[in-house]
Image (spheres, rainbow, N blue to C red):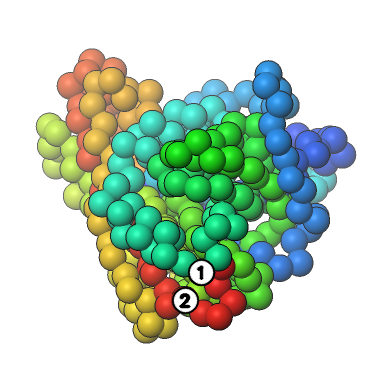
């Protein structure tokens, strides 16, 4: 299993639970280790889940005391923005996916929602409104859904009945996603959800039959060119649209500046590209691949803009960003530790502002006879 990167928005892991811990009944999960793509042959059969008022997800394990306290803390996080690392795997369960703390996902959800490019929504709405079988409602597959922030953001912005299929490897995150899913669309139509747990590999057009839209956040930059090609081929074959948001763009602006900013950024970008992952090149590669499949492609910037009110998120981002840079270039460690200390102090004092650049991509594939 390939080790995950620490992209520009990574997830903070909770400590792995026991292998035989009971799993929630809402089964589905995204990329805990590294997103692979599969919608066919998931580990569990899909279940529709209608969250009940007052439903409480299982308690999450505590966050690590310090994101940079161990070797695992310097990188090795799951998608996306550097945030925090992947926890050590259970030695008795080598295939058990690590669990990422919902606390981190909640911490970044507001920044994600503010950053996503709303300019892509109008062309998406036009495509969805004109598709065949519109009266039957939208079917949306959310790949690597985490705690479901994409659905909470997007479902209330689209009209008409919607059925969301949430994919993730981690049953705990799937439970949070299902329990926190929106109940209604922009026009008051009903929104339903089902969860599918398992590795999302071998994505095929058949697996997306009847799908209106594929969504994902912080996914493209932790895929290889081959995996992006498979995703584009599946969407093109099914004739569905794809909205892929918050892919790392490889640029970070910090104010005030520091002499080490560029060196840390370069090392981080190299870390993103290791093991054949696309990292900052992901949106360019994906745009070309989707276009080659006949899709109309649009991209828009979607930066995080973090200021004094975002100190907690900025601090976690700094730990992950600097940590990944040091993992890639160990010679930076001594200077990077001083840099991180200075940056965290400025953050705590409300003097630091950070722009983490991302890109969103909308691919409108040509409708096919089997598209919904």
Q: Earlier in the sequence, mark 2 or mark 1?
A: 1
Instruction: Say which residue appears at 76% left-offset and 53% top-offset.
Output: 46
Give residue 83's position: percent from left, percent from top. Answer: 43, 38
Q: Is residue 5 visible?
A: no
Dot 2 falls on a residue whose secondary structure is loop
205 lies left or right of 218: right
Please state the horizontal and vertical placement of residue 254, each as a whole percent of the image.
18, 38
**Contact flag, marks 2 and 1 (Cβ < 8 Å):** yes
Task: Give the left or right position of residue 351, taking residue 221 as reference.
Answer: left
Instruction: State left or right for residue 87 relative to residue 249.
Output: right
The image quadrant that residue 281 belongs to is bottom left
| Pick the front one: 215 or 302 | 215
Q: Quadrant of residue 277?
A: bottom left
Rendered residue at 68%/18% (across/down): 54
* Residue furthest top as drawn: 349
Residue 50 visible to an observer of this rendering:
yes
* Residue 342 screen position, x and y as percent: 24, 26
Residue situated furthest front in the rendering = 135
Name the residue: 77% across, 48% down: 47
The kind of secondary structure element at disc 1 is loop
The residue carrying mark 1 is 132
Residue at x 33%, y 30% (from the top left corner): 314
Classify mark 2: residues with Cα within 10 Å, few (<14), some (14-19) or many (20+).
many
Q: CA distance from mark 2 to mark 1?
A: 9 Å
Q: Say above or below: 339 vs 29.
A: above
Query: Which image quarter: residue 307?
Result: top left
Query: Mark 2 against mark 1, which lies toward the viewer?
Result: 1
Residue at numbered disc 2: 367
């Amino acid at each position: 299993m390939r080790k995950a990167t620490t992209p520009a928005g990574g997830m903070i892991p909770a400590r792995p639970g026991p292998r035989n811990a009971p799993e929630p009944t809402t089964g589905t999960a995204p990329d805990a280790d590294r997103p692979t793509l599969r919608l066919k042959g998931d580990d569990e059969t899909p279940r529709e889940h209608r969250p009940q008022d007052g439903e409480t997800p299982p308690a999450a394990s505590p966050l690590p005391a310090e994101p940079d306290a161990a070797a695992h803390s310097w990188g090795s996080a799951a998608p996306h923005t550097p945030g925090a690392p992947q926890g050590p795997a259970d030695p008795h369960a080598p295939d058990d996916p690590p669990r990422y703390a919902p606390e981190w996902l909640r911490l970044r959800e507001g920044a994600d929602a503010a950053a996503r490019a709303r300019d892509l929504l109008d062309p998406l709405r036009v495509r969805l409104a004109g598709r065949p079988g519109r009266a039957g409602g939208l079917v949306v597959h959310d790949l690597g859904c985490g705690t479901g922030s994409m659905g909470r953001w997007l479902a209330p912005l689209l009209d008409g009945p919607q059925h969301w299929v949430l994919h993730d490897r981690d049953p705990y995150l799937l439970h949070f996603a299902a329990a926190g899913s929106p109940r209604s669309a922009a026009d008051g139509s009903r929104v339903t959800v089902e969860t599918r747990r398992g590795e999302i590999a071998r994505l095929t057009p058949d697996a997306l039959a009847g799908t209106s839209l594929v969504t994902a956040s912080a996914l493209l930059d932790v895929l290889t060119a081959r995996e992006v090609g498979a995703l584009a081929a599946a969407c093109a074959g099914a004739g569905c649209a794809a909205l892929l948001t918050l892919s790392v763009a490889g640029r970070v602006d910090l104010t005030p500046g520091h002499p080490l900013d560029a060196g840390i950024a370069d090392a981080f970008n190299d870390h993103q590209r290791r093991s054949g992952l696309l990292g900052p090149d992901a949106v360019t590669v994906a745009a070309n691949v989707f276009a080659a499949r006949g899709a109309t492609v649009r991209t828009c910037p979607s930066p995080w803009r973090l200021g004094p009110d975002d100190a907690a998120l900025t601090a976690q981002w700094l730990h992950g960003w600097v940590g990944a840079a040091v993992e890639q270039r160990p010679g930076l460690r001594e200077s990077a530790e001083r840099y991180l200390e200075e940056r965290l102090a400025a953050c705590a004092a409300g003097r630091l502002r950070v722009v983490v650049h991302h890109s969103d991509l909308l691919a409108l594939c040509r409708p096919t006879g089997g598209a919904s």
